Image (tube, grey):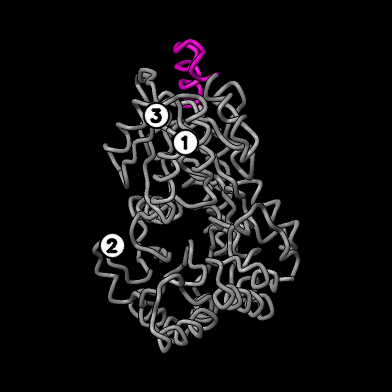
């Protein structure tokens, strides 16, 4: 039986990357792979027997004692304890493939070398821009920032990109400098998966070899719709409440357009966003974290879903999930969002950060006939089933695994099957 080790910072569904981590592992387990898991300890983690291998939690924004801060600073750059944990796991579970998702500065990148030393092939899905930007967002708190290109990572410290802290930003800049100098990712990762063409192009532009990169879009596991839901009377955002997501722009636009807004999610900006909604007179319902049927119900009753991001989004699953529910999406014209939304067919795009443009787009969505929105929602749902199905994702990823393991016969068969299905 083939063995797949799934690696991620968190072992709970904190955001889109964590959802991909869980869904990916479940998909391969259902197909006959033996799956293992590796992450940090965290109070909200899902229960799993694999937690005996997990490493201690690191949250860089926490106010730890000085001795703990010094220990964390060392672990961020090179962690012997994380390497030992990986080796204990591999002693019991000699994985064929380690699929790494978000580890950022929480889990030491030196575990990648341990995988290679033990003969485990490594695939890394980039859910953000950590390989290019030390602070992983390419956003300095004021707007898009590419100052660290190609190797000027000191700008992360100069701009205090991590929580406004010089010490923390300097640590992250040093981490990136050492990882680039030692080739922690370039030398020890067999293939880097980019869920958007935008991210693939960004990595190539910043000097990553094209042959190390693979474009495999995310998938949605929701069942095909049998009927498009009715058109509701509120706009819906679901995702993390953090500054780069542009939720403050959405709240201002909703107030100007005079429409109700429902926000699903949690994050560091929640208190500020509640205060902003009160200040501008917006009608906003904060649902907090929701998942499963509770989240589906909120999406189904919306008129449109909105993704107002102000950073280089990758391939947000929230767009695909909204489409799968038969909902039109209004998205910011930035990053990989533009690859998912067909203007006027499955939604609309607006200039990122432009409150007036978003308000005008919301008014347009409220002015057009609901039957038009339902037709657009039907096209969106069909698009998901056609281009972003779990079958497509699994076949592409399985072929990639066979390729890096050197199974050319299986690769050839997989390509033939895929061509027939397409």
| Identity of the residue drawn at 60% across and 60% down | 192
Separation of disc 1 and disc 3 at Cα?
A: 30 Å
Examine the rendered structure and indicate whether residue 72 appears above or below residue 157.
below
Separation of disc 2 and disc 1 at Cα?
A: 34 Å
Q: Residues within 10 Å of mark 2 (few under 14, many from 20)?
A: few
Choose between 1 and 13: the one closer to the eye. Answer: 13
Q: Residues within 10 Å of mark 1 (few under 14, many from 20)?
A: some
Magenta highlight: main SS: helix
Q: For the residue labelled by badge 3, is the local secondary structure a helix, a strand or a loop?
A: loop
Q: Which label's residue is closer to the chain start, 3 or 2?
A: 2
Q: Which label's residue is closer to the chain start, 2 or 1?
A: 2
The residue under label 3 is: 325
| Identity of the residue drawn at 56% across and 52% down | 411
The mark found on residue 280 in the picture is 1
Contact between marks 1 and 3 (CB within 8 A): the answer is: no
| Identity of the residue drawn at 53% across and 83% down | 78
Contact between marks 2 and 1 (CB within 8 A): the answer is: no
Which one is closest to the eye, mark 3 or mark 2? 2
Examine the rendered structure and indicate whether residue 61 appears above or below residue 251.
below
- Location of the N terminus (image quadrant): bottom left
Q: For the residue labelled by badge 2, is the local secondary structure a helix, a strand or a loop?
A: loop
The residue under label 2 is: 44
Q: For the residue labelled by badge 1, is the local secondary structure a helix, a strand or a loop?
A: helix
Q: Is residue 108 visible?
A: yes
Residue interval drawn in magenta: 364-382
Q: Position of residue 276 (x, y in %)?
A: 45, 43
Choose between 285 and 195: the one closer to the eye. Answer: 285
Q: Which label's residue is closer to the chain start, 1 or 3?
A: 1
Q: Is residue 338 visible?
A: no
């Amino acid at each position: 039986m083939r063995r797949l080790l799934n690696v991620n910072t968190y072992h709970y569904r904190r955001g889109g990357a964590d959802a991909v981590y869980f869904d990916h592992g479940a998909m391969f387990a259902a197909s006959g792979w033996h799956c293992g898991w590796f992450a940090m300890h965290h109070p909200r983690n899902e229960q799993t027997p694999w937690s005996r291998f997990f490493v201690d939690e690191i949250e860089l924004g926490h106010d730890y004692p000085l001795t703990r801060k010094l220990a964390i600073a060392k672990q961020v750059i090179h962690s012997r304890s994380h390497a030992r944990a990986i080796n204990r796991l591999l002693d019991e579970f000699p994985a064929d493939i380690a699929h790494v998702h978000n580890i950022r500065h929480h889990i030491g990148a030196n575990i990648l070398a341990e995988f290679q030393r033990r003969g485990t092939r490594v695939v890394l899905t980039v859910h953000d821009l950590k390989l290019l930007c030390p602070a992983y967002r390419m956003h300095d708190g004021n707007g898009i920032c590419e100052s660290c290109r190609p190797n000027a990572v000191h700008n992360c410290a100069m701009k205090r990109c991590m929580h406004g802290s010089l010490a923390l930003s300097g640590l992250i800049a040093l981490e990136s400098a050492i990882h680039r100098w030692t080739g922690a990712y370039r030398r020890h990762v067999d293939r880097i998966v980019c869920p958007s063409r935008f991210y693939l192009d960004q990595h190539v532009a910043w000097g990553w070899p094209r042959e190390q990169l693979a474009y495999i879009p995310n998938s949605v596991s929701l069942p095909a719709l049998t009927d498009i839901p009715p058109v509701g009377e509120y706009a819906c955002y679901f995702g993390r409440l953090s500054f780069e997501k542009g939720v403050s722009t959405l709240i201002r636009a909703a107030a100007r357009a005079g429409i109700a807004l429902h926000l699903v999610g949690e994050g560091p900006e929640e208190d500020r966003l509640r205060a902003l909604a009160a200040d501008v007179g917006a009608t906003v319902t904060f649902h907090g974290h929701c998942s499963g049927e509770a989240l589906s119900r909120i999406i189904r009753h919306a008129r449109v879903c909105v993704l107002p991001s102000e950073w280089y989004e990758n391939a947000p699953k929230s767009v695909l999930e909204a489409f799968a529910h038969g909902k039109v999406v209004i998205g910011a014209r930035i990053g990989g969002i533009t690859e998912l939304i067909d203007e006027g067919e499955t939604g609309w795009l607006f200039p990122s950060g432009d409150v007036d443009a978003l308000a005008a787009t919301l008014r347009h969505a409220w002015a057009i006939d609901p039957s038009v929105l339902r037709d657009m929602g039907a096209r969106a749902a069909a698009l998901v089933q056609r281009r972003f199905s779990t079958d497509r994702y699994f076949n592409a990823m399985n072929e990639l695994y066979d390729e890096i393991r050197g199974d050319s016969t299986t690769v050839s068969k997989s390509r033939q099957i895929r061509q027939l299905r397409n």
